[in-house]
Amino acid sequence: MSNSAFSRRSLIAGAGGSAALLGLAGCSGGESGGSADGSAGGSAEMPSYTPYTGLTPDLPGTEEGVDPAFFNFPSDNPVSVTEKPGNGETLTGMANIYYAVPPGPGSNSYWAGLNERLGVDLQLQMVSAADYTQTFPTTVAGNNLPDMVQIPNAPVPNLPQLLRARFTDLSEHLSGDAINDYPNLANIPTRSWAPTAHNGGIYGIPIPRGAIGTYHFIRADLFEAAGVSTSPQSYEEFVETTKALTDPGQRRWAFALVNQPRQLLGRMNGEPNVWAEEGGKLTHMYETEQFAQTVTDLIAMWKSGVMHPDSFNDANPFKQLFNAGTVAINAADGYPGYIQYVLDNADNPGFELGLMPVNKRDGSGLADWALGPGYYSFNALSKQDDPEKIKLALRVANWLAAPFGTEEYLYRLYGEEGVDHARDAEGNPVLTPTGTTNTVLPIRYLADSPYNIYVPGRPQDAEAQHDYQSLEIPVGIPNPVVGFYSEAAASLNAAADLAFLDGVYAIVQERQPFSNLENVISTWRNAAGDAMRTQYQDAMQEAGATSS
């Protein structure tokens, strides 16, 4: 099976083609000029990519997507934006926040300083991440839409229609070389622009994430204590490793959640990265023999006792259990969590974090890696009567997307030295209690720079991550439907997938026979899978983004 690569043009055309499939071409939504692909004026070219070269990392990135690494924060912090984006205007935004809402600019010197640097009065509606998907549609339905709105990192029903009706097609500003007016946005890799492509245009600014997607974290100290390798070479060795790591009498298991061995086994068994495409036809991982093998393996693993007794409870606190040494493997967790694990265990001298490669079941080498989509979410700009307001928002986003190590990046993350942060012996900024409270504004979900590996003062951790990415990314496979929209995926699949996994896990726990897997798959296909397949295939064919 092959996975097609996207050109700049085909990715935009692909999303627009999907919009046409869903009926947008025949429904102007109050606008005129819609073309056959649902766009307002044809298919736009993807933004040109111009990587930032103002600072030299200790370990370079690669075109394949290995992130550059810095051992310490650069002592030289060049300016990347020479003029203030605004001139006293008010700019509003809405984004999710994972922390307590910080004080307002009247009692928050960081926020006041940010406004001064941006040249705007930045007013933010900050919504708890847990509530964002419920708040978003209510806000969009209202009459007072913020200037900048984070589109949730969860499926949004009728997204192409919504974007065309309420948000701005930014193609004239960002398509091709036009993005060079905003060089920090041009520093965002092409792969990260996929979610912004709709209706034949560019409808937002992506919040980029690395190609690696996730890491398979391990407690290397527990592996050493058990006398097992941190890189099991085959399925048999992997199974023996999980047994050696498990001691229920000491309240220790290999895994905290069933999804963790499921992800590892999926790679080991050669499952697709969600979908596989060959000759214009899509096959979902659930429909493959490899997935059936994974279910078989999970049954044996559950019976062997290597999974925490509460592994089928999504609320099981897997990060806390990992930090406590109750579990030894935390597979398929977000890669930015590396530094948080280091910080959480700074006072634990025995803690040693590691990253586990995944090898093929038969021991013949590295398994295919499931590459990430390259983004977290994206920021859409609401329609404006004054086109200058759009340019202002783009200039502000360009400032917020300043690359790692620049003066703007330093302030955006760490605020004012002596107030929000201090410098350690190696010159790394360290947040003060004031900074910890004040700097958590969710501006990183309005615009952000590409990720850089940075674990201050711990070059061994930077090297470990860079080595891991250099090992896995070259054997990575993409999800071929990234960049295409399916209404069934947005509206139906969440419930269908939940029901599917409930059925699978009933089989894993032997509450249902293995023979029921075929019925579980059939139910999922009828509920959402077949509709998703059809919509994705049609969109990809229209874009010419399928293999021959």
Image (spheres, rainbow, N blue to C red):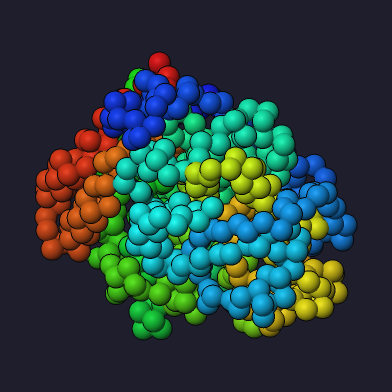
Above or below, comparing residue 282 to residue 380 in the picture? above
Place residue 536 in its image quadrant.
Answer: top left
* Image vertical order of residue 36 relative to residue 511, above or below: above
* Quadrant assignment for the N terminus: top left
Q: Is residue 474 visible?
A: no
Q: Nearer the viewer, residue 170 or 187?
A: 170
Question: Position of 311 compared to 53: left or right?
Answer: left
Which percent across, then down, holds residue 463? Answer: 71, 56
Q: How many marks?
A: 0
Using residue 407 as the reference point, say whether residue 107 is left or right of it.
Answer: left
The residue nearer to you, when weighing 154 against 527, is: 154
Q: Residue at x 21, y 35 (%)?
A: 530
Query: Residue 73 falls in which quadrant of the image?
Result: bottom right
Is residue 299 at least partly visible in the picture? yes
Residue 202: percent from left, percent from top: 52, 35
List the single residue furthest toward the front: 385
Q: In the picture provided, is 244 more to the left or to the right than 81?
A: left
In this rendering, is residue 138 above or below 379?
Answer: below
Image quarter of residue 533:
top left
Residue sitting at x 23%, y 54%: 495
Rendered residue at 33%/35% (across/down): 29
Q: Residue furthest top?
A: 548
Residue 4, above or below 30: above
Query: Residue at coordinates 20% horizontally, 63% vertically from top-left?
Result: 509
Query: Where does the image place residue 86, in percent across and percent down from the top left?
Result: 72, 53
